[in-house]
Image (cartoon, helix red, strand yellow):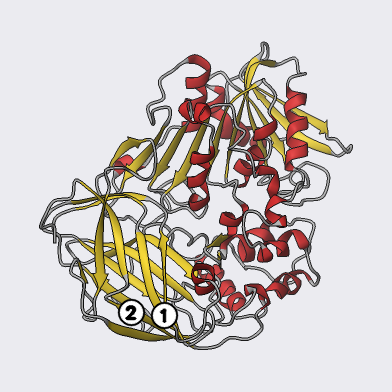
């Protein structure tokens, strides 16, 4: 059971409009005043007045209570025991600020409120971060971004994770006409995705699900950047827009190299005011959205040091409250897990001054070489109704095996082109984003290009480590078919090392139907495209190259 002196109190907190929000307060003793860890959560069930319910909740918060914190766990509006309409992103700022004021008036409240959240529960903290009362001392925010565009897009390509799967699970007030049979079963999820991604135009997907439009869902399909109306919308996703720029309290950010919101978390670190960043930390592990290695494939480039069992949030709060050691990162630094070395390094930024560009060229014979090959062309046909699908990568959330997943053999489809280095003769350390110089053409007026960077073990197993994708129109602007387009993109940063005998492999294609909406090969707003075309896409060998951020580069590594 739980210690006899632990106590659970329940309240119906009245919000700004009279709606009552179910609020559970867990106290480490029946008497006294305590610092408070504040959590607001939509992933809850209606409360029960049973010992089993209390045991489950005390177990959930045990590590917080044992460190002397009280816990305020509020059910978000429309979820669990709370009244109101469930509408993601719409009410969180208003309800959250009311809760912070309410906490300070309670007789069990001591000195200090600490905000904790991850994924959507991280967003609800971001939504209030620029308007905090002085009582809030620190925050721990994991696996979510304050950048609306990066939440659901990558260089013009729509990420499938937030739409077809997540939204139907959280729009509790809407009756579904169709959905995933079992969102925890990969086969069911894949079946649902396969049906969804070949339906055009995609903006009607919401109406097919519910029988009518749901704007807070479908408006995501039309987000064009972080400065458009949707991304700036108050009482919506825009409530978190200025969170980091105006933050004053110490913040622990926690992200993962293989996490779908990581590309939007990277700029959050740079946006922090210098003084705030100097007392904050960014912890980046080999994790997916679950921030653990327990539910992913056993990648040989990871080791036991990639798993952190202790609650880093509670350790962070104790560090701020009591001056206790925080063993996971140095203030003012990014603590990054080194893939391939099973250890951690501290750096002030994701781009290191000492990194030298190691340029590698794809060649006609499927090699990846430091020598620029003779100019030639490699072409392939891409059909949006039969897109290649890959497991793993940064945006394979709830679709297939995510994280650094094992990949099929090179050139496993005619529309996937693979290129590999020779085995390394010396260890190769890389720290930061990989830059890709594209030199391409298409016979369509728009299309997409995908690049995946793989680490290959001595035994020949290939594991995806980096990935990026772009539409041609996003990267090159208005495109005329059959003309050469040259442009540059960078992947999300990664700190990694390949050992002697291992290799780098690069896969190039035009879609990843497991993670992104397959481009229709037609110009215009993607969600409104009602027809598709088959494209012939071409890589210009000798002009197309990648630059890896090598540190301590030794001559003759290849």
Residue occupying the far right of the picture: 18
User: Could you tell me how far apart the alpha carbons at marks 2 and 1 are, in whole angstroms?
Assistant: 9 Å
Relative to 92, is 498 above or below?
below
* Depth order, front residue of 540/493: 540
Quarter location, residue 125? top right
Which residue is painted at 79% across and 29% down in the image?
Answer: 11
Query: Residue 230, position in %: x, y?
Result: 71, 56
Quarter in which the C terminus is drawn: bottom left
Dot 2: what SS? strand
Residue beneath disc 1: 484
Q: Residues within 10 Å of mark 2 (few under 14, many from 20)?
A: many
- Which corner quadrant holds the N terminus? top right
Mark 1 surroundings: few (<14), some (14-19) or many (≥20) residues within 10 A: some
* Residue 267 horizontal/vertical position (percent): 50, 46
Task: Give the percent coordinates (x, y) of residue 349.
Answer: 39, 40
**Res 514 visible:** no
Q: Is 269 situated left or right of 428 in this image?
A: right
Disc marking residue 400: none
Q: Nearer the viewer, residue 345 or 347?
A: 347
Query: Residue at horizontal 68%, vertical 65%?
Result: 222
Q: Are marks 2 and 1 in contact (CB under 8 Å)?
A: yes
Give the mark toward the camera: 2 or 1. Answer: 1
* Of the pair 291 and 507, the residue shown nearer to us: 507
Q: Position of residue 74 (x, y in %)?
A: 71, 35
Seen in the picture, residue 15 relative to 444 is either above or below; the reply is: above
Residue placed under numbered mark 2 in the picture: 540
Mark closest to the chain's N terminus, 2 or 1: 1
Q: Between residues 167 and 24, which one lies in front from this camera angle? A: 167
Task: Describe the element under mark 1 as helix, strand or loop.
Answer: loop
Query: Residue 344 occupies which quadrant of the picture?
Result: top left
């Amino acid at each position: 059971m739980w210690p006899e002196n632990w106590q659970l109190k329940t309240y119906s907190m009245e919000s700004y409009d009279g709606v009552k929000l179910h609020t559970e307060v867990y106290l480490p003793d029946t008497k006294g005043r305590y610092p408070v860890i504040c959590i607001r959560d939509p992933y809850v069930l209606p409360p029960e007045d049973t010992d089993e319910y209390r045991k489950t909740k005390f177990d959930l918060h045990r590590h917080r209570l044992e460190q002397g914190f009280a816990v305020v766990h509020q059910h978000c509006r429309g979820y669990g025991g709370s009244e109101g309409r469930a509408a993601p992103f719409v009410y969180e700022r208003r309800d959250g600020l009311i809760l912070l004021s309410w906490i300070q008036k309670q007789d069990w409240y001591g000195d200090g409120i600490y905000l904790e959240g991850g994924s959507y529960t991280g967003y609800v903290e971001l939504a209030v971060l620029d308007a905090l009362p002085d009582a809030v001392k620190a925050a721990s925010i994991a696996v979510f971004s304050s950048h609306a565009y990066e939440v659901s897009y990558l260089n013009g390509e729509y990420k499938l994770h937030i739409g077809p799967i997540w939204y139907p699970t959280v729009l509790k007030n809407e009756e579904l006409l169709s959905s995933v049979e079992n969102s925890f079963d990969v086969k069911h999820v894949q079946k649902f995705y396969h049906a969804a991604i070949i339906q055009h135009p995609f903006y009607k997907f919401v109406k097919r699900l519910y029988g009518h439009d749901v704007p807070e869902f479908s408006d995501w399909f039309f987000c064009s950047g972080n400065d458009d109306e949707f991304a700036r919308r108050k009482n919506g996703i825009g409530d978190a827009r200025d969170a980091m720029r105006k933050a004053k309290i110490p913040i622990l950010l926690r992200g993962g190299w293989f996490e779908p919101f990581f590309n939007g978390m990277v700029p959050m670190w740079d946006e922090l005011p210098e003084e705030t960043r100097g007392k904050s930390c960014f912890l980046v592990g080999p994790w997916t959205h679950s921030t653990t290695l327990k539910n992913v494939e056993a990648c040989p480039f990871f080791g036991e040091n990639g798993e952190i069992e202790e609650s880093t949030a509670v350790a962070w709060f104790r560090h701020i409250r009591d001056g206790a050691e925080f063993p996971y990162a140095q203030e003012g630094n990014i603590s990054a897990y080194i893939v391939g070395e099973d250890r951690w390094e501290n750096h002030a930024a994701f781009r290191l001054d000492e990194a030298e560009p190691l340029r590698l060229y794809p060649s006609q014979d499927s090699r990846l070489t430091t020598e620029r090959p003779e100019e030639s062309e490699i072409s392939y046909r891409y059909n949006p109704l039969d897109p290649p699908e890959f497991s793993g990568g940064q945006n394979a959330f709830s679709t297939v095996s995510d994280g650094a997943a094992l990949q099929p053999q090179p050139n496993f489809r005619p529309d996937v082109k693979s290129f590999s280095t020779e085995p390394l003769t010396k260890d190769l350390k890389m720290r930061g984003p990989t830059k890709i110089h594209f030199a391409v053409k298409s016979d369509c007026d728009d299309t997409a290009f995908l690049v995946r960077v793989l680490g290959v073990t001595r035994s020949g197993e290939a594991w995806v480590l980096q990935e990026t994708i772009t539409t041609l129109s996003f990267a090159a602007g208005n495109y005329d078919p059959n003309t050469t387009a040259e442009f540059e993109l960078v992947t999300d940063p990664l700190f990694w090392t390949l050992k002697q005998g291992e290799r780098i492999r690069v896969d190039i294609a035009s879609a990843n139907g497991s993670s992104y909406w397959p481009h229709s090969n037609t110009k215009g707003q993607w969600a409104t495209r009602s027809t598709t075309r088959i494209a012939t896409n071409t890589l210009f060998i000798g002009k197309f190259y990648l630059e890896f951020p090598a540190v301590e580069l030794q001559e003759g590594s290849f």
